[in-house]
Image (cartoon, rainbow, N blue to C red):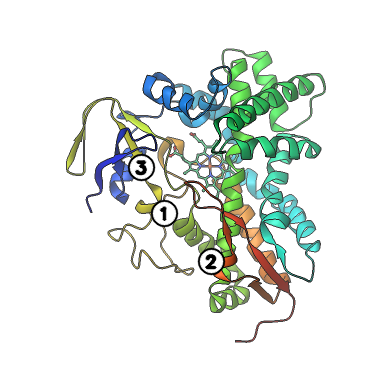
Amino acid sequence: MPPVRRGRYFDQSPIWLVTGYDEALAVLKDPGSFSNDINTRKDAVDVLAAAGLPDDVAPYLSQTLGAYDPPDHARLRRLVSREFTVRRVESLRPLIQTMVDELVDGFPDEPFDFLERFAHPLPVRVICKLLGVPDEDTERWRTWSDGLTAPDPGAMADSARGLVAYMSELIERKREDGDDRLLSALIRVRDSDGDRLTDRELTSLALTLLLAGHETTVSVLSEGLLLLLNQPPEQERLRGDLDAVPAAVEEMLRVAGPAEIAPMRYAKHDVELGDVTIRAGEPVQVVYATANRDPRRFDAADSTVLGREENPHLAFGNGIHYCLGASLARAEADLSFRTLLTRFGNLSVAATADEIRWQPGAARRLAALPIRATSTPARH
Ligand code: HEM
């Protein structure tokens, strides 16, 4: 299969599919040739409108950090990157551990849905704490966040409007009654130096931070656990060597990374890639899911090897748009799996493979994962 080839987008328009590892890396590392700025592309804006994003709120949801090119991208990313460094995230580990423990303490003896009891609430609590978003608002914005990917354009439009109105209102509340959290810090930047951050950018950035790490982290926690439960001997190995958990998390990201495709990029000029010439203006879709299974880059690329030693996967992207929350997501997954393995001698799926439910739609996401967690060690 050629690593760069013609394909079609969801609306059937022609695109270039970049499925090979080296070719994907070449695109991600070259923002001078490939633009992320969909807002300059009339056809891309039409696709957003066709998907149901109403004009009055589309700019708030489409002009996210990931849709900016340099130099504006660097200007915005600098405002928030300090909060997400490996060092800063290290200092959050005790707080994340407390949240993990609280959720695990509430596990019942009988089978329960891991998504509902753990994989959903953990990332939400962590990001709300970091931003300074009140916990009691969670249900409101989570319903809208789910609605954004609804197949029904009307529901999507309502959710988009709900989210933008909620965030604008929260920003006003925080303006009057600020705290030491990230959202208040961004509001202070906006109010003291409007050249660095416009009003709309502030709302967009706050929404991006709230939403970007939610479904993705839920997916790694739940699909990662499923991979682990499907390999009982690996579960035992990790229980005996918890320092091997980070490597297992990297393999979960490689084989079940939730970002299966990248945001669309557009060639800024004619570019040679693989064996093809991409013409200026043509849309280019990097496919993370296939790049991460490229046999030219990974041995046993289609197998799940939780002890894989070298693992330069692209689950968090690469280049200037490399995932801002990668350290945070890694810390959440590491602490979660360590705790689950330590607290429960036996973790198993409480359903047949047929009963495990997946969400409808293009992305591969679990809808429910019934599990049993007991302290009795497993017998093999
Ligand atoms: C396991 C969980 C996660 C995965 C797999 C993931 C994946 C990704 C990927 C692949 C990109 C690059 C997109 C591109 O090609 O341009 C990205 C960007 C981004 N991610 Fe994550 N993400 C995760 C968690 C998070 C978390 C927890 C946050 C926290 C706030 C976050 C915030 C962002 C932001 C703001 C960007 C845009 C960065 C930029 O354009 O400079 N992500 N993520």
Mark 1 burial class by Cα count in 10 Å: few <14, some 14-19, many 20+: many
Q: In which quarter of the image is the N terminus?
A: bottom left
Q: Where is residue 97 drawn, in percent x and y?
A: 73, 56
**Front residue (pair 277, 353):** 353
Give the answer, above or below, for where 176 lies relative to 64.
above
Residue under the image location 66 percent in, 54 percent down: 119
Q: Mark 3 points at which residue?
A: 286
Viewer-proximal residue among 213 and 324? 213
Please report whichever mark, 1 or 3, sits nearer to the chain's N-terminal start. Answer: 3
* Three-letter amino acid code of the residue under disc 3: Val
Sequence order check, earlier mark of 3 and 2: 2
The answer to whether residue 142 of the structure is visible from this angle is: yes
Residue annotated with mark 2: 227
Mark 2 element type: helix
Q: Which amino acid does label 2 sit on?
A: Leu
Could you tell me which secondary element the residue under label 3 belongs to?
strand
